[in-house]
Image (cartoon, rainbow, N blue to C red):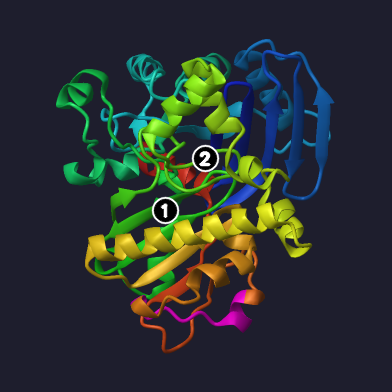
């Protein structure tokens, strides 16, 4: 059975076509610069590629091109879109309305679009893509919405509420929502399987580290706290995002730099983080290289990241009253042994002992990297959000 997975942004449309008989990827690609000029890059599992500049005034034209490259030409993998059993869509924000995967209807699309204030860059784009997909796919093809925020709907009130007047929560829905939920759900389940245990029997701290990073406390298979908050800006220092800071610093900088709220949001989301502190760039690889060559600001950036991760691991162990495992995932988590080693060093209070030799050789593969006598196991677990979206979609249409 074939499932198409779609991840739409404001100017992009990423996709994967999976054969769920063996969970293999047949093809994947990205339509980007939608609404600007347009470009598609497409690749099949057997190495065939197609790339072209295209006119993508809207997501509809991007979907039409997606259909064309999947079904015709030298990089085609199917003969007709009717071969696709269903489409799974990644949706960034489900608010408090969506706590599980849903079959998409016109009413669901309207509700997703209505949440645009909570995720202005993402949710309206998702709605546009959902409507475009309905136009292009054969009539009656089921579509599923998988929400990044859904996994975190198990957080208790004490974890998701802010100490603002309660009316701000009731009227404006201001609370912690958390993100990367699809990734945290996938890797925590994969870790439990690798450890030979049931998710309900584990207390896990899941560290999704990349250009955007979040850490989640997972107790018994459920999210009980997470570092990202009302938006993905909260929590750790990230590629271009500042992470948590004193709210008064925001108003102070706005006043000193004469910024509007929109300008300040852009400042914190796009000009801060690794980029702002290191003055080198937003990519951890560039920052690490600069730090190795003696750049003090780059070194400070790495120290800040490691220190913040350590604090989250410790606080979440306290919140869960125990810790069985720490996992690393995401672009940095899977491919930066130096970050993992630094995080796990001097963690005697939690009885974490990393195997430096094992850790050094691990990049992007499932592997235990703690010593045999470490009371808390440490693992690298590659994430695969697209596969989980496909699994959720398949489960929904075969109920």
Whether 50 is among the magenta residues is: no
Whether 354 is among the magenta residues is: yes
In this rendering, which labeled residue sits more in front, label 2 or label 1?
Answer: 2
Left-right relation of 78 to 371: right
Label 2 with label 1: CB-CB less than 8 Å: no
Counting from the top left corner in percent of width and height, residue 272 is at: 58, 37
Element marked by disc 2? loop
Q: Residue furthest top?
A: 57
Residue under the image location 60 percent in, 31 percent down: 270
Specify whether residue 23 is in view. Answer: yes
Counting from the top left corner in percent of width and height, residue 2 is at: 55, 40
Counting from the top left corner in percent of width and height, residue 90 is at: 48, 34
Q: Which residue is mark 2?
A: 242
Front-lying residue, 337 or 267: 267
Residue under the image location 61 percent in, 39 percent down: 16
The boundaries of the magenta stretch are 350-359
Q: Which mark is residue 231?
A: none
How many discs mark residues in the rendered view? 2
Q: Which mark is residue 215?
A: 1
Q: Residue furthest front?
A: 256
In the depicted structure, whether residue 307 falls above or below residue 9: below
Front-lying residue, 203 or 56: 203
Query: Label 2: how many residues lie within 10 Å, few (<14), some (14-19) or many (20+)?
Result: many
In the depicted structure, whether residue 350 falls above or below residue 392: below
Q: Mark 2 or mark 1: which comes first in sequence?
A: 1
- Residue 173 lies in what quarter of the image? top left
Where, quadrant-wise, is the C terminus in this rendering? Answer: top left
Residue under the image location 75 percent in, 62 percent down: 294
């Amino acid at each position: 059975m074939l499932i198409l997975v779609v991840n739409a942004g404001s100017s992009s449309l990423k996709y994967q076509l999976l054969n769920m008989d063996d969970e293999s990827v047949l093809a994947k690609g990205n339509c980007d610069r939608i609404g600007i000029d347009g470009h598609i890059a497409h690749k099949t599992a057997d190495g065939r590629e197609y790339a072209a500049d295209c006119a993508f005034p809207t997501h509809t034209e991007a979907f039409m091109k997606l259909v064309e490259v999947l079904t015709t030409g030298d990089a085609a993998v199917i003969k007709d879109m009717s071969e696709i059993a269903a489409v799974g869509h990644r949706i960034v924000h489900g608010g408090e309305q969506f706590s599980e995967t849903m079959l998409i209807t016109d009413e669901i699309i309207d509700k997703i679009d209505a949440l645009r204030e909570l995720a202005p860059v993402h949710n309206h784009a998702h709605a546009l893509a959902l409507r475009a997909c309905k136009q292009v796919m054969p009539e009656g093809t089921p579509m599923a919405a998988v929400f990044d925020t859904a996994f975190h709907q198990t957080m208790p009130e004490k974890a998701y509420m802010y100490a603002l007047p309660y009316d701000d929560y009731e009227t404006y829905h201001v609370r912690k929502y958390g993100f990367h939920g699809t990734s945290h759900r996938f890797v925590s389940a994969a870790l439990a399987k690798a450890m030979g245990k049931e998710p309900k029997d584990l207390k896990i701290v899941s560290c999704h580290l990349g250009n955007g990073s979040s850490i989640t406390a997972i107790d018994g298979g459920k999210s009980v706290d997470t570092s990202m908050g009302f938006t993905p800006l909260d929590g750790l220092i990230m590629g271009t995002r500042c992470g948590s800071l004193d709210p008064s610093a925001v108003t102070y900088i706005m006043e000193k730099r004469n910024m509007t709220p929109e300008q300040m949001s852009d400042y914190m989301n796009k000009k801060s983080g690794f980029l702002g502190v290191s003055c080198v760039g937003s990519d951890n690889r560039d920052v690490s290289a600069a730090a190795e060559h003696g750049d003090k600001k780059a070194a400070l950036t790495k120290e800040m990241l490691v220190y913040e991760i350590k604090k989250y691991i410790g606080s979440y162990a306290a919140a869960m009253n125990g810790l069985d495992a720490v996992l690393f995932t995401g672009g940095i988590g899977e491919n930066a042994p130096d970050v993992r080693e630094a995080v796990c060093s001097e963690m005697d209070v939690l009885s974490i002992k990393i195997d430096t030799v094992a850790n050094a050789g691990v990049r992007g593969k499932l592997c235990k990297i703690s010593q045999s006598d470490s009371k808390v196991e440490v693992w690298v677990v590659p994430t695969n959000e697209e596969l989980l979206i496909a699994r959720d979609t398949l489960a929904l249409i075969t109920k």
